[in-house]
Image: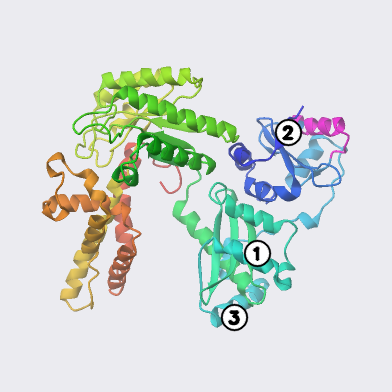
Amino acid sequence: MLSFHPLSLADKSWIDRHVFEENSRSADFNFGNMFLWDGRYRQMVADDDRHLVTLCCAYEHPVFPFPIGCGDLAPVLADMRDYAAANGFPLVIKGLEERHVALVNALFPGCFDCTEDRDYADYLYSADKLISLAGKKLHGKRNHINRFTAEHDWFFRDLTPDCLALLARWAEDADNAAGTVDGEHTAIARAFEHYDALDLLGGALFAEGELVGFTVGEKISADTFDVHFEKARADLNGAYPTVNREFVKLVRMEAAAVNFDGIYIVAIDHGGPWLKDKQRTEKWSTEAAMDGVKRSFEAALLAGYDLIHVDPTVDINVPAGQTIDIRLVAARTVELIRHCETFRRAKGLPEISYEVGTEEVHGGLADERTFDTFIAELKAGLAREGLSDIWPCFIVGKVGTDLHTTLFDTEVARSLTAKVRPLGSYIKGHYTDGVSNPQDYPLCGMGAANVGPEFTMSEYDGLAELERTEQKLLAEGRIAMRSRITETLERLVEASGRWKKWLLPAEEGSAFGALSAERRTWLVKTGCRYIWQEPEALVARQRLYDNLRRVGMDPEEVVLGRIEHDMDKYFYAFNLVDLNNLL
């Protein structure tokens, strides 16, 4: 017998699995649509491991949407029939596609009457056609857009929280409220409340600086994007079709930029007390620092994160030159995992994965004896808390690499891997940036490797290369003003203070300007990732790009090419080539 429970955000991961197994273009078959409109349809869901079975309780009697997933359909249809009979209502199934009708009739010939219901039909459009609006069928939409773009100073940007307030004002206006579907306001409010957790994508249309329309949707199959909501001011001719067209452009750009249909992991990296600059500089107490980390982990769990890296290896109370006791690291790791699991289970949230440890010199798993002690203490601590079923998938180990060492130690890696594989874990290497032998990682059984700062250095190098070209153009009188991009980046990194955490022992207490030119350049290149989005940095980059575009160059392609070149080393070394179309 099917076992139903009310739909909740905690159901997203397993429902998404069935959605993408089905790979349907129907708007009915996606978690976002189900969750947003649950207030109207009052859905119950059941998972029989083969299919998602849904029961809508908002009609005269309960109704089943078509069960989606994989495997034999006959048993699940029989289960639905038995459930309806046991609960005294007729078996009615909505939302079937033509292929579903043929399948049901083949399995149960003569048992069902199938009727088309056009009120529940979806509109399917080609993205290319909605962008170009070519042809007679779309000439009306094209004319409205042309009028809107001619009469207004407009732009389209990422979604803004102002949209919800705008919707409330529109609800008071008869012209705008006339097209509102029952429960739509509640559904839109829910979309804003859970925007990130639902993996939604949205955009907003502005005219004369005022918000006049917005739209929200999500990817529902390999080649289909479902527009959940599309709202615009009814008194502005062309606002609706403009929102529609610009959003399709946005979706197309996102798809082209990512071009990835495999697994991705949303994670917290290095979550622990005093790892945030604010906690460290303000000298938070142990209790306050740990509580801050717990609140951060709670927010990650509610947002639907997949993995949390628990890293309590920093303690500002440990005297300089000394290392935190590894037993204390293990105890705090257990405390933080216990908090996550207690919170997660109380909220009915999906299971997550954990990563523990660090190879940082301030208290990491820097030698095998320390590593062994940490593993033993962690295992015993989790058992005491009744969490023997919880174990990290990744354990970070010291495998020879750090900020200034780039040789991966294959002997140590094989030894650590042999220790953790019987426990169901993989060794993860941090500081893989610039490593000279990345091809040895998979050969040693490593499970993962962190790479990141190297690519911000690649980006800096690309910009510096462009600036040298810009200087030549200035000397030739072909441009009027330099961007001063590298000077700007150095000034912003220095002002951020981020560079201080990478000072060598002999450099502690030194002013930025007192450091050697080589060290300043290294600190700037490493620290740029924290200031790329600063307004001054954006302006300097734009000026640089504008100067070079005037002479026919494609500066962005130069920068991206540098990054891609450095990424290629890892794609090939880690056997990631052909993992998806982009790689």
Q: Which mark is residue 4?
A: 2
Label 3, secondary structure: give it.
Answer: helix
Give the image quarter of residue 145.
Answer: bottom right
Q: Which of disc 1 and disc 3 is earlier in sequence?
A: 3
203 is higher (above) or lower (below) than 519: below
Q: Is residue 520 left or right of residue 114?
A: left
89 is higher (above) or lower (below) than 244: above
The answer to whether residue 183 shows anywhere in this view is yes
Label 2, secondary structure: give it.
Answer: loop
Magenta stretch contains residue 80: yes
**Rendered residue at 74%/71% (across/down):** 174
Q: Amino acid at mark 3?
A: Arg
Residue 300, position as x, y percentages in the image: 48, 41
The residue pinned by badge 1 equals 168
Mark 2: few/some/many CA within 10 Å (<14, 14-19, 20+): some
Mark 3 vs mark 1, foreground winner is 1
**Rendered residue at 60%/64% (across/down):** 165
437 is higher (above) or lower (below) than 217: above
The residue pinned by badge 3 equals 147
Mark 3 vs mark 2, foreground winner is 2
Q: Range of the magenta residues? A: 75-91
Q: Is residue 456 left or right of residue 309?
A: left
Q: Which mark is residue 326?
A: none
Q: Is residue 53 left or right of residue 244?
A: right
